[in-house]
Image (cartoon, rainbow, N blue to C red):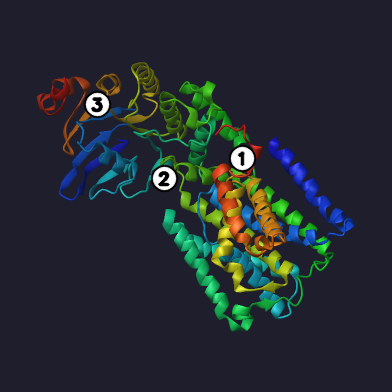
């Protein structure tokens, strides 16, 4: 019930934001929330494997990168068809996730973390080494993805496209985790020996979830490159993976509202602190403030920000 | 013969934990495996359940060689187990725990859309199994919040939910009070004959009340097999095992 109330308010607020921001002459906020929602999609996808699957993937930025490169490379050769670009972005990310997952899911614990990190670093250095597509400097997107009936150059239209996709991803993950597939995935996280004993083979379910999450991450990469009009290998930097993971943990792992709350909390806080002008040093060294705040948040909100909404649940 | 174990052997270094073990279990029969601590019961169960690989020997189940089959595949063939130490899904309710076991038994879980917990094909039998073990009043309690005795009841319900042909019970009375033990013995008595059972148990009262046959394991070897009466009067068993505490 509380979840339903949360989503009703969140959807209303997000839908109302562009006209309100424009009326107040604060169009900047449309841009900011657009960016936050793109990261929220990445966090929602990571939550599927981290929160529900128990797979601590420290390489989720890989799919942002693959999705971003898919769009940017097509655009580089003058192919601007949105449906084609995005389909390839999603498909390529799914394939990369299949390859990474097939190897890494055979391990667990610290090894799993290190292997997913290592694969992502490989892709990062691959991005740096390809001079054709800008190498270290990155590559400018000459044109945003083109869709019939839609114009992503219109900031408000683009905003609503992202909002609809975010809600779609949240709903998709919600359906998945409550389906038979999701039950098997969560059971394997809850007690692997038990899951094996009743006849589940966790590997298949984990790998499938990993691929779904990768595909969704690729979508957010395609959106992000359209949002920034610029792609650099930094999309895949390990700090980016850490940031997405932090959104999930801060918001609340294994909850539907958690990753969305976490992305808004982290990126809004970042924005507020980075633009702080009085005293000036806060804006200049905002990380010094953000770090301890995040540590406190993790200590005091054991179940993430989502725990604030679901206090009465038995656990 | 439902289960045939032949010359099963497993060593850890110089220790022969399982030493050329032969066992037979017929359909519907209850075989108890007893033995002093360190006799190799846990190692034997591990191999039967598919968590440990034997060095030599064969396990045939329903006419099929399952010696190298991993645990989930054995479970799907009708070989269910419960654990010595409680093993349930703590974040799920009792009802969901049983539903998970039914779901695993029904085969592929590659269904992504319909909510599993509103699927009558899972929930109706799940409620039924909870009723059979006397846990229906706790259906919506999280497994983490159940008492020890209730956990064991839940484990039996989960094992039954796989509609097993053979139920491997690893010390089902471990850690139970007298009342809980008696209730568990009664429960297992009602389940006898419905499927074969292998019962590994220290509680001799339970063993003699439930078993059709008893195998005595000492230092990894089966030193005697027979009816409860035969085992009670077997001199070698008395010396090696029963003599210690009786």
Q: Position of residue A281 (x, y in %)?
A: 65, 63
Which is closer to the viewer, label 2 or label 3?
A: 2
Callout 1: helix, strand or loop? Answer: helix
Q: Disc number at residue B239? A: none
Cα distance in 3D space between marks 2 and 3 = 28 Å
Asked whether the residues under the numbered discs 2 and 3 touch, taking CB atoms below 8 Å apart as contact, a structural biologist would say no
Quarter of the image with the N terminus of chain A in it: top right
Residue B11 location, x and y as percent? 20, 48
Q: Residue furthest front?
A: A279
* SS state under label 3: strand
Disc sitting over residue B72 in the figure: 2
Q: Quadrant of residue A271?
A: bottom right
Q: Nearer the viewer, mark 2 or mark 1?
A: 1
The answer to whether the residue labelled 2 contacts the one labelled 1, judged by CB atoms less than 8 Å apart, is no
Q: Residues within 10 Å of mark 1 (few under 14, many from 20)?
A: some
The residue where tag 3 is placed is: B213
Residue A111 in the image: state x and y as whole percent. Answer: 42, 58
Residue B151 makes an appearance in the image: yes
User: Chain letter of disc 1?
Assistant: A
Q: Tell me, yes or no, whether dots 2 and 1 are on the same chain.
A: no
Of residues A172 and B233, the one nearer the viewer is A172
Q: CA distance from mark 2 to mark 1?
A: 35 Å
Q: Is A285 placed above or below B1 here? A: below
Left or right: A153 with respect to B11?
Answer: right
Which element type, helix, strand or loop, lies under badge 2? helix
Give the left or right position of residue B68, taking residue A292 as reference.
Answer: left
């Amino acid at each position: 019930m509380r979840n339903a109330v949360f989503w009703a308010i969140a959807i209303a607020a997000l839908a109302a934001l562009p006209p309100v921001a424009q009326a107040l002459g604060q169009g900047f906020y449309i841009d900011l929330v657009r960016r936050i929602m793109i990261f929220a999609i990445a966090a929602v996808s990571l939550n599927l494997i981290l929160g529900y699957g128990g797979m601590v993937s420290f390489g989720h930025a890989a799919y942002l990168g693959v999705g971003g490169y898919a769009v940017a490379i097509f655009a580089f050769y003058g192919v601007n068809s949105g449906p084609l670009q995005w389909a390839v972005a999603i498909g390529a990310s799914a394939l990369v996730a299949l390859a990474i997952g097939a190897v890494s899911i055979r391990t667990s614990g610290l090894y799993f973390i290190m292997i997913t990190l290592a694969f992502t670093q490989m892709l990062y250095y691959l991005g740096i080494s390809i001079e054709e597509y800008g190498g270290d400097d990155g590559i400018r997107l000459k044109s945003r993805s083109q869709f019939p009936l839609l114009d992503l150059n219109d900031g408000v239209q683009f905003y609503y496209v992202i909002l609809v996709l975010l809600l779609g991803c949240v709903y998709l993950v919600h359906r998945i985790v409550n389906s038979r597939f999701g039950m098997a995935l969560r059971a394997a996280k809850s007690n692997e020996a038990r899951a094996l004993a009743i006849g589940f083979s966790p590997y298949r379910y984990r790998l499938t979830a990993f691929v779904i999450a990768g595909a969704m991450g690729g979508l957010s990469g395609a959106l992000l490159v359209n949002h920034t009009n610029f792609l650099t290998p930094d999309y895949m930097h390990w700090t980016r993976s850490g940031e997405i993971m932090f959104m999930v943990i801060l918001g609340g792992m294994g909850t539907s509202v958690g990753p969305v709350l976490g992305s808004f909390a982290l990126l809004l806080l970042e924005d507020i602190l980075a633009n702080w002008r009085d005293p000036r040093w806060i804006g200049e060294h905002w990380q010094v403030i953000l770090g301890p705040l995040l540590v406190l948040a993790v200590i005091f909100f054991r179940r993430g920000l989502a725990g604030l909404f679901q206090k009465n649940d038995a656990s | 013969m439902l289960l045939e174990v032949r010359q099963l052997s497993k060593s850890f270094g110089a220790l022969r934990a399982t030493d050329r073990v032969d066992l037979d279990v017929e359909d519907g029969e209850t075989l108890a495996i007893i033995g002093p601590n360190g006799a190799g019961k846990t190692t034997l169960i591990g191999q039967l359940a598919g968590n440990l690989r034997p060095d030599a020997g064969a396990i045939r189940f329903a006419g099929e060689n399952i010696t190298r089959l991993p645990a989930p595949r054995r479970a799907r063939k009708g070989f269910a187990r419960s654990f010595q130490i409680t093993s349930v899904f703590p974040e799920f309710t009792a009802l969901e725990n049983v539903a998970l076991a039914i779901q695993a038994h029904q085969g592929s879980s590659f269904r992504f859309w319909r909510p599993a917990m509103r699927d009558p094909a899972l929930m109706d039998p799940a409620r039924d199994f909870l009723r059979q073990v006397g846990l229906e009043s706790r259906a919506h309690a999280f497994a983490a919040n159940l008492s020890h005795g209730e956990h064991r009841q839940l484990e039996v319900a989960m094992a039954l939910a796989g509609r097993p042909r053979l139920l491997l019970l690893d010390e089902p009375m471990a850690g139970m009070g007298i009342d809980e033990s008696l209730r568990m013995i009664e429960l297992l008595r009602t389940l006898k004959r419905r499927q074969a059972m292998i019962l590994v148990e220290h509680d001799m009262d339970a063993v003699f009340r439930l078993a059709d046959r008893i195998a005595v394991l000492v230092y990894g070897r089966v030193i005697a097999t027979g009816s409860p009466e035969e085992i009670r009067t077997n001199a070698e068993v008395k010396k090696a095992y029963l003599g210690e505490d009786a």
